[in-house]
Image: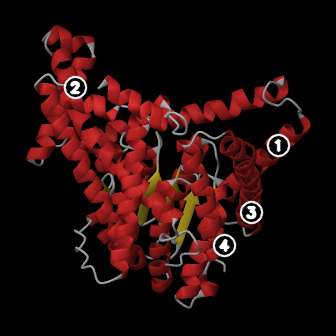
Amino acid sequence: MDALKETMNSIFGSWLQTDSSNHLGLTTFIFFLTFSISLAVMIRRAQGTLPMPKLRRVAGLDAMDEAIGRATEMGKPVMYNLGMGGFIAPTFSSLSVLGYVAKRIAQYDTRMITVMRYAIVLPVAEEVIKQAYIEVGKPDAYRPDDVQFLSEQQFGYATGCVGIIQREQVAANMLIGNFLAESLIFAEAGTQIGAIQIAGTNNNVQTPFFIAACDYTLLAEELYVASAYLTQDRVKTATLLVQDYMKQGLVVIIILGVLFSTFGSKLINQLLTLY
Amino acid sequence: MRKTVPIIITFIAGAIMILESYIQSDFLYKFVQSYLARAVTVSTAWAVGLGAVNIIRVHGRRIQNKRPSYFYSIVLLITFFWFSILGFVMQKHNSDVFYLFFYDNILLNLSATMYSVLAFYIGSAAYRSFRVRSIDATMLLLTSIIVMLGAVPIGQAIWPGFPTLSSWIGANINTPVLRAMTIGLTLGGLTQSMRNLIGIERGHLSGGE
């Protein structure tokens, strides 16, 4: 094993970056390369005739239409909360969902109040919603005042959201994105006024709060499936396929690691930390 | 053009960031630190300006039209301008006594109050979740009772095994589940980022798919 480590050092030592605090090294590099190549191959095949698997039902995403329908019937607004993140993966996923929800909102002539913590997300959210109204042929129905930047202060933002939920008596409360300690404040405020609530976050610690307080919760990576699920796009579905294959690979490595460790061998551990 | 240019910029910037993470290169490091990081700072500063305009517009119109609860909008705008003036006038606003007086005595207290509300919300959410309606809810209730008793001295007084059992649940049931979710989330986040990087995901580009 020492000889192998030395060989790896001589091959990668001069150019490959390692950073133990971010778990960057040869293992993550190989993982990233495998992921990227698999992604390129699958996208190519998806653009052809490769049959795509049907995505399993995601209750939280199916309930979007139900929530909008309920708000329409009640004549009350929908509140869409983009969360506490700047331009990070969950916010991008949330913006995709926002585009879908905004189109439905525009079709049904319902009102939607959109809020976000970071001002940098504001112009993008405005454009997404404006475009949705244009696409359904109702550009004049777009209300710029309903897309609101509240505050970059965590609890200032939470206070603003609760204020809107209480004042406007929203019929549906959608919480999709990155959420921190204030997640339960949003969810409980919605519960108190009887709003139908759909939530999804990348923050594992906050997920139980959403499960406890919301009607539907997107669990773990369901948040990132939203875009492919709502558009049923073949190429996006192909990327999910790669994600699942990689996950299966990781599960195999974990099982091997457990078996080797159980029998007193550290081979898998040593292989994963070669460089 | 409206979508192609942002996709090209995203791809180039993203590719540089990825290369900088994996490749040892002073040039890439300096480029990211001195150019990309500054670009983010400048665009964020512009966005804060847009955010300020949004606040003034939304609340200004609310006051103008005397919508319900417009009094709060007046308070908000006064506070907004007051803190802006303080920020502009006080050169060292982070350490200025006058600035800190308002910051410590208004903002911190209000934030702490809102954070404290969480305790009551956790209580009401727990009450609903712990109602014994199904096998899952019953298991949740029993587990939470054990974990709670394991965390307080009275639990140990009732039965010394509670802390050990509580730790066992945390290490052997909670942690594996959280790790499984973390793996899923990490892979999901990576896939989402790659979709953004190569331009498959266009939901943020004016909703165009």
Neighbours of disc 3 within 10 Å: few (<14), some (14-19), many (20+) = some
Left/right of residue B199 with respect to residue A6 in the rendered view = right
Residue A146 in sight here: no
Q: Circle 3 is placed at which residue position?
A: B63
Amino acid carrying mark 3 in the image: Ile
Asked if the residues shown at circle 4 and circle 1 are in contact, with their CB atoms under 8 angstroms apart, the answer is no
Amino acid carrying mark 4 in the image: Val
Q: Residue at x 41, y 53 (%)?
A: A33
Q: For numbered disc 2, what is the local secondary structure?
A: loop
Q: Which chain is mark 1 on?
A: B
Q: Which chain is mark 3 on?
A: B
Which circle's residue, 3 or 1, is located before the other in the chain? 3
Amino acid carrying mark 2 in the image: Lys
B165 to A114, vertically: above or below: above
Q: Circle 1 is placed at which residue position?
A: B82
Q: Nearer the viewer, mark 3 or mark 4?
A: 4
Are labels 3 and 2 assigned to the same chain? Answer: no
Pinpoint residue A134: horizontal percent, then vertical percent. Answer: 59, 86
Pinpoint residue A254: horizontal percent, then vertical percent. Answer: 21, 39
Neighbours of disc 4 within 10 Å: few (<14), some (14-19), many (20+) = few
Pinpoint residue A119: horizontal percent, then vertical percent. Answer: 66, 55
Q: Residue at x 36, y 43 (%)?
A: A204
Amino acid carrying mark 1 in the image: Trp
Q: For numbered disc 1, what is the local secondary structure?
A: helix
Q: Residue furthest bottom?
A: A137
Asked if the residues shown at circle 4 and circle 2 are in contact, with their CB atoms under 8 angstroms apart, the answer is no
A72 to B163, vertically: above or below: below
Q: Circle 4 is placed at which residue position?
A: B5
Mark 3 → mark 2, Cα distance in angstroms: 68 Å
Mark 3 → mark 4, Cα distance in angstroms: 40 Å
Q: For numbered disc 4, what is the local secondary structure?
A: helix
